Amino acid sequence: MTPGASRPRSSTLTTLLAAAVTGVVRRALPAVVLLLGLYFIAGPLLRARFATSAAYLPDTAALDPPRGASATIIWTLSALTLAALLFHRRDA
């Protein structure tokens, strides 16, 4: 077994987050714009302005792996829960 194989990988969680956001907004392009805006614009701006609360953004996995992985897991589970609830309400 390779070192770190039991830990969730950031790219897998980001993929699940992207799928959940796509399910919430029902379109791929707005989901891409939303996530890229979060990762490349809002994340760095919030990290520069509010350093303590920016640690809970999903793009912090590279900066502090344990805290970043837990933040990404929470964001992913929240988005998946919201997507499932909206799917049940709209489509089921």
Image: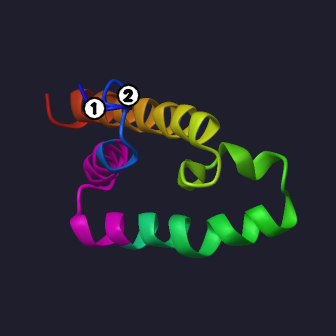
How packed is label 1: few (under 14 Cα within 10 Å), some, or many (20 or more)? few
In-image side of 46 versus 59 (left or right): right
**Residue at screen point 30% across, 30% down:** 5
Looking at the rendered structure, the number of numbered marks drawn on it comes to 2
> Does 33 sit above or below residue 8?
below
> Does 84 sit above or below residue 52?
above
**Residue at screen point 36% across, 40% down:** 9
Which element type, helix, strand or loop, lies under badge 2? helix
The residue range painted magenta reads: 13-32
Quadrant of residue 26 within the rendered picture: bottom left
> Does 48 sit above or below residue 70?
below
In-image side of 76 versus 48 (left or right): left
Which element type, helix, strand or loop, lies under badge 1? loop
Residue 26 covered by magenta stretch: yes
Q: Which mark is residue 2?
A: 1
**Residue at screen point 33% across, 69% down:** 32
> Does 39 sit above or below residue 76?
below
Residue 85 or residue 59, whichever sits in front: 59
In-image side of 67 versus 27 (left or right): right
The residue singled out by tag 2 in the image is: 81
Residue 2 or residue 24, whichever sits in front: 2
At label 2, the amino acid type is: Thr
